[in-house]
Image (tube, grey):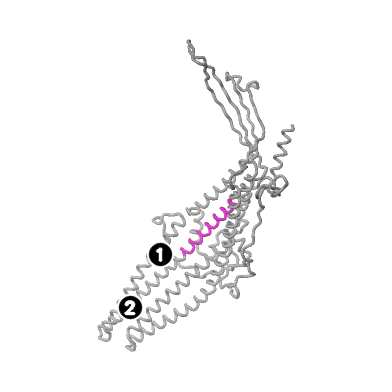
Amino acid sequence: MKRIAALLALATLSGCLIGPDYERPPPAAAPSAEYKEAMGFRPAVPRDAIDRGPWWSMYGDPTLDQLAAQVDISNQNLKVSEAAYRQARALIRQAQSPLYPTVGYTGGSQQIGSGAQRGGGNSVGQFSGGSTLSWEIDVWGNIRRQIESDSAAAQASAGTLASARLSAQSDVTTNYFSLRISEQRTRLFQESVAAFARSLQIVQNQLDAGIASRVDLTQAQTLFEQTRAQLVAEAINRAQFEHAIAVLVGKQPSDFSIAAAPLPPNVPTVDAGIPSAMLERRPDIAAAERQMAAANAQIGVALGAFYPNITLNGSIGFLNTMLGPLFQIASAVWSIGPQLAGTLLDGGARSAQVEGARANYDGTVATYRQTVLTAFQQVEDELVQQRVLEQQEQVQRAAVGSAREAEQLALNQYRAGTVPYTTVVTTQTTALSAEQTLLNIRLSRFTASAVMVKSLGGGWRDTDLPAPTPIAGQQSGKALKKSSWWSWWPF
């Protein structure tokens, strides 16, 4: 009974944990009250709240809704991240296993013979069987610190999975809008080719009447053919965007197609909220923070190497020359008792491991802070793009109207013979370029809105992380303090 009581007392000690308890360090700089680029900006078509889940539905495009929803089902890069998360969860269960006894079994049969004699050798059959038990008593909390580390790493992997999902959804969205802008650019080139063909016919008629020169006809022919070449080349762009979307949704490009359709009429602008809220909304920030927690627990694992391992070993074996009475008490031999094993001298290996664990933790802190700074930069970048691009589109629309008016005036004046055809070519080229610039601005606005959602976490919250794996004694266990009999251990 005394031995059993001693073992129970030893197990009670396992409520202690060596190493620093984790506390989240603050970012490199405290978040400001509001974003600088959001001051004085009122979104024209605001989306103040991003839905959890299908955030892309804010565009009101059924085709985009269907494509983005397929990312969770078929995207192969996302499956890689999901497999990494499942692997991280398996590591938790693997780390938990030493908290429980390991029970094994043995068995065998052999023939044992004596030395050879005149009449031949004598041999005796011998049967054996038994069971073994080994249980490492987690006195210092090494095992639980490893579980703590693996649990935080699994949460970080879940954050990485959420980041991969959000990134793939954003890539589908931006490629989809690039495809739709390519379709509009194609229509622009088709309309321009038709208009330039009419202009070419006008010049031909003028040449036949002896009013225009051969140079005018050549200039009109050049502009017409150049625009036709742009029309042909635009088919490459649309095809490449369609292929990119196919891969993102896990489809063979040869078996995938998207029917032509118009762009959504409005570009939603996203309210960024307050900077401090973003720390809870980005899965990459959550993943970086959980990596800090995992690295902090590894310090405790490294410190635990300075303390001896205490293992409870037990075994029971049976040995008999006959199989029938093998498992009777008379055939049994058993043993049970604790075993202590530790390292006395190692040339500084353990100290180096602790130093490396602390350095690794410091590195994860720096990575976390840099992730936060980069996130704030990305939001500020997208805010200024939302604001400036909206203003730029208004100005560019006015420029397109003026360019189209100048084009028509120049063509009318050429017919009247008051301006040379170079004036017509210049105004037509300017009008086409202005239309292309407007389409590029429109694409930039759609892209900026999607990237803004990505920068804000897509409606994700850090509470969406899976709960940490509970560890026996983790809530009540505190790091061991130096005491008189172990104070000489260098940690």
- Which residue is found at the position 52% from the left and 18% from the top? 113
Residue that badge 1 annotates: 238
In the rendered structure, the answer to whether residue 221 lies left or right of residue 174 reads left
Q: Is residue 472 left or right of 437 when viewed as pictured? A: right
What amino acid type should be assigned to the residue bearing mark 1?
Arg
- Who's the residue at 27% across and 86% down the image? 211
**Comes first in the chain, label 2 or label 1:** 2
Query: Could you tell me which residue is drawn at 39 percent across and 76 percent down?
Result: 432
Q: Compared to 332, does 166 lie above or below?
A: below
Label 2 crowd bin: few (<14), some (14–19), many (20+), radius 10 Å? some
Instruction: Look at the image and say whether residue 166 sits in the magenta stretch.
Output: yes
**Mark 2 vs mark 1: in front:** 1
Q: Position of residue 287 (x, y in %)?
A: 58, 56
The number of discs equals 2
| Coordinates of residue 238 in the picture (x, y in percent) | 40, 64
Q: Quadrant of residue 6?
A: top right
Residue 10: x, y in percent?
A: 70, 39
Which secondary structure, mark 2? helix
In this figure, which residue is indicated by the disc labeled 2?
Answer: 198
